[in-house]
Amino acid sequence: MVTDLILDTLGGLALFLFGMGLLSDGLKKSAGDRLRRLLQIVTKWRVMALLAGAGVTCLIQSSSATTVMVVGLVNAGLLSLKQAICVILGANIGTTFTAWLVGLAAGLKVFKITAYALPAVAVGLTMQIFGKRQKVKYAGQIFIGFGILFLGIHFMKDAFAPLEHSERAKSILIAIGDRPVLGVLAGAIITMLLQSSSASIAMIQVLALTGAFGGTDWTTALRIAIPFILGDNIGTTITAQIAALRTNIVGRRAAMAHTLFNVLGVAVILPLVYLGLFDRLVRAITPLPLNAETIAIHIAVAHSAFNVVASVVFLPLAGLLERLVTRITPARAGELLIRPVTLERHLLNVPPVAIDQARREIVRMAETARDALDDAVAALCHDDRTRLARVGEQEDRVDDFQTEITRYLVELSQRDLSSEIANELPVLLHTVNDVERIADHAVNIAEIATRKIDQREQFSPDAQAEIALARAEVEQMFADILQAVGASDTRTAERALGHEDRLNQMQIDFRRSHVMRLSRNACSPIAGLIFVDFVDNLEKIGDHLANIAQGVIGGLQWNGKPPARPAEVQAGAED
């Protein structure tokens, strides 16, 4: 009996989870982009954010998917963490819809699971095979998901049926439920193992239906089930925590907010459970009498009541929760530079917003290239191997930026774009390549510094002074470029071109002074070659920065060729 129970339960759970996955995926495909835009629009107010989170989660049947969308909008700078927390509170309410679905399907005699599960699969498969439009195929997937989900419930119900006659199994479950803390822990562990709060709640409902929580004493069954439900709400946060292990600081904070909210919510409700007040509240607000047909519905009410009460308590405290999450989940040094985080794919359907995100990432990419250059030059000037070691890592990050931004812009180019955005795309792609080449030249300078350190060469005082001048010129040009790209500031971009002219002149002048130093033996030939290589690389960096400046000056609209340099800049160069 034990073997059959385990195998049938695992099979039923597998069908339930598979059906949930199909259902969620179909709903997201059919309405996902509209739901994302809805979240962005309605989350300006806390209550609206809460309702939006609940509504979206009800529709897509996945609080995790809602959280992913919210994190994406936060990463893109379109939502604050406080707004995201409010949406997550709503997602916790929305995820209880599945328990209501199971309660109605499994508990009411008027609805026979086996009478509708297989026909639903048949209808869905027909729509998928013969449907011409994509929306019809998505609807078919939703029908198949519903059918398989209900079929999984049916198999679990049959698997748990023997427990009604097992006094030992019932006594164990009752003993755990009579100690609410143990019940909470058991519910959390079950949900962590299943990685699905919907599946664990469905198991609790089916166990109650089969009499495993006290036979026909339905009041006891409800009381025993409630601690497991509370534990489920803690256990479900493990999925987000696992996913957040490989995400950025915003993702980790969103996951931590989810966990913190549920843990604190359970702490608030648990005293009511010990006093027997919570199950009385559930019975009082449920309009149906508590019996064999409605126990699953009462469990759904308990699940919803917990999340609604907790959300009402914590919604006014969203700001406090945000500060607490930020404090207990600090950003690690350099973490935001690990990889691009604002290039959200769902924003591709809103090209003006998507291109703005690409510009912001290009600025961050340029900042990383600047840091690599700073470290490389510092290593050259001060023989600092510590800073030298960072250059390669920063160049790798720049390469990651280039890959991600280029892929994003290529995907954007396949959308229906205005002529202005279509003309801007090639300019941004050229800008990305220029920034990547700057990082490559930083690596070249790092290699030059390595040669200088290994061969124990030293620059003459005159060469050091010239290096300082060239370094300051590039640093100021870089600062101007970052400001120009970030704010589309053409005047600052024009000023940056003036720095490039001075770098070109420095290259000529410093080569001449280098020859003079060699002629009077003021430096060694090797140190002189290192010096010339350094100056040449700085001049090439200036060329790439000038390319970026020209793109900004042209309003990021080349129309086939780079813009001509402004007359006043050319005049300044001649002077």
Image (spheres, helix red, strand yellow):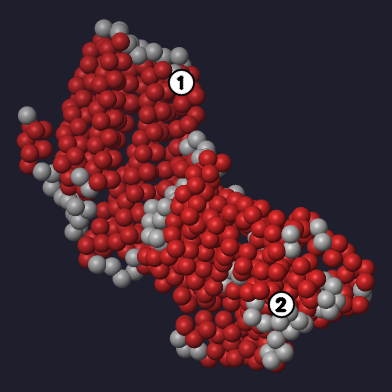
The residue closer to the viewer here, 344 or 457, is 344
- Nearest the camera: 124 or 422? 124
Q: Secondary structure at mark 2?
A: helix
Is residue 109 shown to the viewer in this render?
Answer: yes
Residue at label 2?
296
Q: Quadrant of the N terminus?
A: bottom right
Query: Which quadrant of the rendered structure holds the C terminus?
Result: top left
Q: Is residue 109 left or right of residue 220?
A: left
Q: Position of residue 256 (x, y in %)?
A: 57, 50
State the count of labels. 2
Would you say 351 lies left or right of 187 here?
A: left
Q: For residue 159, which quarter of the picture?
A: bottom right
Residue type beneath disc 2: Ala
Residue at horizontal 24 percent and vertical 27 percent from the top: 473
Query: Local crowd at mark 2 within 10 Å, few (<14), some, or many (≥20)?
Result: many
Q: Determine whether 307 is above or below 383 in the image.
A: below
Residue that appears at 30% across and 10% down: 461
Circle nearer the viewer, 1 or 2: 2
Q: Is residue 429 visible?
A: no
Instruction: State the mark number for residue 458.
Output: none
Q: Is residue 479 left or right of residue 108?
A: left
Q: Give amino acid for label 1.
A: Asp
* Mark 1, residue position: 384
Q: In the picture shown, does residue 87 fall above or below 137?
A: above
Indicate the position of residue 155 as horizontal and vertical percent values. Answer: 77, 80
Asked if the residues shown at circle 1 and circle 2 are in contact, with their CB atoms under 8 angstroms apart, the answer is: no
Label 1 residue SS? loop
Vertical placement of residue 185 versus 533, above or below = below
For image coordinates 38% across by 19% down, the residue present is: 381
Q: Position of residue 466 (x, y in %)?
A: 26, 18
